[in-house]
Amino acid sequence: MILDTATINQLKENKSLITFELLEALRAKGNEGKQICLDILDTKKDEEDYYLDAFGGRITYKSERDLKKAFTRMNLDQIHIDEIKRCASDFNYFRSNYLKIKTPTSGISFPDFRPYQDEFIEHILNPYEKLISLQPRQAGKSVTIGSWLSWEYTFDHDKDIGICGNDSKCACEVLDKVKNMLNLLPMWMKVGTTIWNLKTIANENKMRIMTSASTSKNPFRGFTCSIIIVDECAFYEPQAWKTFKDAVFPSQSGLPWKKNIIISTANGINHFSEIWNNSEKRKRIKNVKPTETVQLNNGKIITIEEYYKNKCQI
């Protein structure tokens, strides 16, 4: 063991002895060290393994012991407050040290993100309003998106997030990944819950994540989503996609900040491939000189400078 049992117990009872330098030294030892950090930072439980609030009462939300109801008070030490601040300001710190996932093969563990997942996260964290991602099956799309949504849900406030899939099951599966990650966070880091069901979750910071199917005529009715995740977009029926984008995206026009992420595996020539090809054209245009030319869909040839000036559509 990196630390013996006696030392771990001493640190659990005297959290003023825990420093950021100690946590970093333990985490440098890998997943075992990360788990020890979680163990020594853990807060008090009773004999039946319920976490206790500031008044000695059991922490639950509708009998769920992994959740806490809104505005539950807990006795936190300075190291807890410092770690919450670090996580809130640094997604990668949160993901590396506190995020856990549950898989059928490995059980509960710290995720091992691949380089292409790290690259995808970098794009998400950049200030782009629109992001499209073409990925193969079994590439960990849901885990990657879920890790970022878990961070947003925990540390942001006053935002509605919409997840739409080609069917209701697809959207709920993405939300389920997020819920599992939130359940596995330390209790002292969790925000109080106000809604927790199959299709929607919400917390005391007025963060809400909702799901909808592409076949829905009124997706996210009554809400304006600051973040919209469109999963398996290439598998939407063409009319369903048109109905969805016409109903949802215009509602964001008055928002000061928004982010829309479209993800899918390939599925032939359709609306998704058109969006992807147009994004590739725009990417190439940004890397050329203003005097170079581009051909529009109507056959007209104009300079890049004219393209931006007139906001023409390629």
Image (spheres, rainbow, N blue to C red):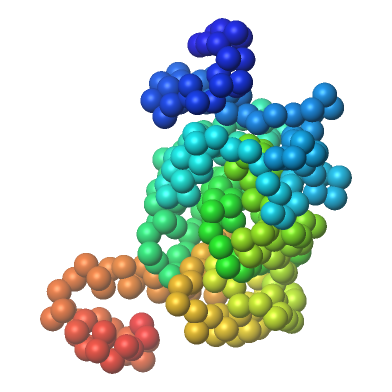
Q: Residue at x 70, y 40 (%)?
A: 54
Residue 194, picture quadrant: bottom right
Residue 238 placement, left or right of 96:
right
| Residue 200 in view of the camera | yes
Q: Is residue 144 above or below residue 124?
A: above
Q: On the rendered image, what quadrant is the C terminus found in?
A: bottom left
Residue 181, percent from left and from top: 64, 43
Q: Is residue 161 above or below residue 106?
A: below
Q: Residue at x 38, y 64 (%)?
A: 127
Please tell me which residue lies in front, 229 or 203.
203
Please tell me which residue lies in front, 163 or 86.
86
Residue 206, picture quadrant: bottom right
Q: On the rendered image, what quadrant is the N terminus found in?
A: top right
Q: Residue at x 74, y 81 (%)?
A: 217
Residue 45, percent from left and from top: 74, 29
Q: Is residue 242 above or below residue 269?
A: below
Residue 182, percent from left and from top: 65, 46
Residue 314 placement, left or right of 257:
left
Please tell me which residue lies in front, 128 or 135.
128
Q: Residue at x 57, y 28 (%)?
A: 41
Residue 112, percent from left and from top: 51, 33
Please tell me which residue lies in front, 308 or 79.
79
